Amino acid sequence: MASADLLHWTLGLLVVLGIFFLCIWVIGKFSRMAAAGAERMRVIGGLSLGMREKVILLQVGRKQLVLGVTPGRIQTLHVLEGDDCLAGEDAAKSSVKGVFAQKLMQAIKSRPDA
């Protein structure tokens, strides 16, 4: 009877381990698919407006999004397309942070309510 109990325990352990490794394999497949989609999106630059507020320039495909980021909210402030984009592919790889900050400050100063 002891050998039958040992056989049941061993089979149960093998089933649990099989399910565990199957789950790890599935998670690995899904994480690779998500990483492939993330290559088309990247942060080009950002500017801190306070302790918790930021403005982020995000490249998504051929569009650039200017996002306002606070602890409780992310809001699209402006969408740049085509010639309106602040940086091309080559310029985006170089130092765009200064250009973005300058253009943002110009936009803030040119607002009538500022």
Image (cartoon, rainbow, N blue to C red):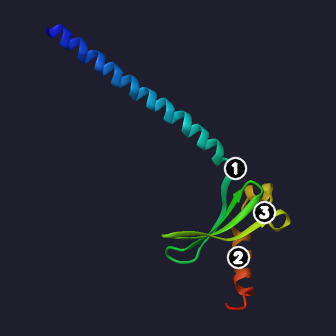
* Residue 100 falls in image quadrant: bottom right
Amino acid identity at mark 1: Arg
* Mark 1 or mark 3, earlier in chain: 1
> In this orientation, which residue lies closer to the viewer: 1 or 108?
1
- Look at 18% across and 13% down and name the residue there: 5
Q: Which residue is mark 3?
A: 87
Per the image, label 1 sits on a secondary structure element best described as loop
Amino acid identity at mark 2: Leu
Does residue 38 appear left or right of residue 110 in this picture? left
Does residue 53 appear left or right of residue 38 in this picture? left
Amino acid identity at mark 3: Ala
Q: Are marks 1 and 3 in contact (CB under 8 Å)?
A: no
Q: Position of residue 13 (x, y in %)?
A: 30, 21
Q: Quadrant of the N terminus?
A: top left
Mark 1 to mark 3: distance in Å?
A: 15 Å
The residue positioned farthest toward the bottom in the image shown: 113
